[in-house]
């Protein structure tokens, strides 16, 4: 079975993973996919993204985070971690807000207008020059995120992204993309969350 697992190419099974494996074999396959992505993680890209966040915090600017589906949950987690945990004890608090949390606004906008505008309409109300828009996406092709990034750039805000697969269209649009180049949604989302924890606790320990 190990030989069969070794022959599976990363990204070959985009939505789930290889079929006809036992739970143990599937777990081994999944672990190898994650290990491969950790080895391939672009640390220079991680530094660029973190640098943008640090500059925003230094200047007292807001960080707006957003995503769809599982990435919306990651965005919410990032907002909590940055606001509650990232600042060292007694340090300057982070102004970080998830735009994926206002169910009333999101459903109203989706029902009365279009789902593609659920984030950009919030940014039109909240965003100021020098703020940061951080998008989280597996495919990198979500229209509502692309519209948010384009609007942010037009307002002279900084843009960053946690992406999966090949990075999609967002990779070329944001100032600081960080791509987890796996074709498996679970692996992508796992690493996005772990990367957010790396950033959070790196920022926390800087003040010690």
Image (cartoon, rainbow, N blue to C red):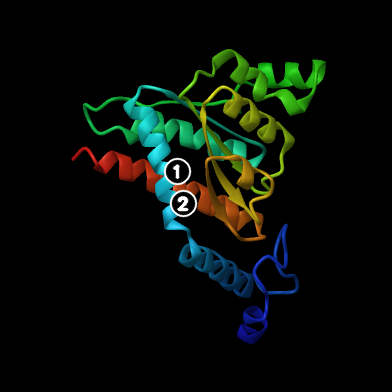
Please report the residue visible at 73 percent of the width from the left and 20 percent of the height from the top.
107
Vertical side of 174 occupied by 179: above or below: below
Q: Nearer the viewer, residue 32 or 49?
A: 49
Dot 1, how many residues are within 10 Å of its Cα: few (below 14), some (14-19), or many (20+)? many
Q: Residue at x 24, y 28 (%)?
A: 91
Considering the numbered disc 1 on the image, is that residue within a helix, a strand or a loop?
helix
Pick whichever, 14 or 56, lies toward us. Answer: 56
Q: Position of residue 121 (x, y in %)?
A: 67, 18
What crowding class fits label 2: few (fewer than 14 Cα within 10 Å), some (14-19), or many (20 or more)?
Answer: some
59 horizontally vs 121: left or right: left
Cα separation between marks 1 and 2: 6 Å
Q: Is residue 93 left or right of residue 132?
A: left
Disc 1 to disc 2: CB gap under 8 Å: yes
Is disc 2 placed on a helix, strand or loop? helix
Label at residue 49: 1
Q: Does 67 sit above or below residue 17?
A: above
Residue position for label 2:
45
Report the disc number at residue 196.
Answer: none
User: Total label count?
Assistant: 2
Residue at x 67% of width, y 73% of height: 9
Q: Is residue 171 left or right of residue 53?
A: right
Q: In the image, what residue occupies the spot 52% across and 68% down?
A: 36
Q: Quadrant of the C terminus?
A: top left
Percent coordinates x, y for residue 206 in the rendering: 24, 41
Image quadrant where residue 118 sits: top right
């Amino acid at each position: 079975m190990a030989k069969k697992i070794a022959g599976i190419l990363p990204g070959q099974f985009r939505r789930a993973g290889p079929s006809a494996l036992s739970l143990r074999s599937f777990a081994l396959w999944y672990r190898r996919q994650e290990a491969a992505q950790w080895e391939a993680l672009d640390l220079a890209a991680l530094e660029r993204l973190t640098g943008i966040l640090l500059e925003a915090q230094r200047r007292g600017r807001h960080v707006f985070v957003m995503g769809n589906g599982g990435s919306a949950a990651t965005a919410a987690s990032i907002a909590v971690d940055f606001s509650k945990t990232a600042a060292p004890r007694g340090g300057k608090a982070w102004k970080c807000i998830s735009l994926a949390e206002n169910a009333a606004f999101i459903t109203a906008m989706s029902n009365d207008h279009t789902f593609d505008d659920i984030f950009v309409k919030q940014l039109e109300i909240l965003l100021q020059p020098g703020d940061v828009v951080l998008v989280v996406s597996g495919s990198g092709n979500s229209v509502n995120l692309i519209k948010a990034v384009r609007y942010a750039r037009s307002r002279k805000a900084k843009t960053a992204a946690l992406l999966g697969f090949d990075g999609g269209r967002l990779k070329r649009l944001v100032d600081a993309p960080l791509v987890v180049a796996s074709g498996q949604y679970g692996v992508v989302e796992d690493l996005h969350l772990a990367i957010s924890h790396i950033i959070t606790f790196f920022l926390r320990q800087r003040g010690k």
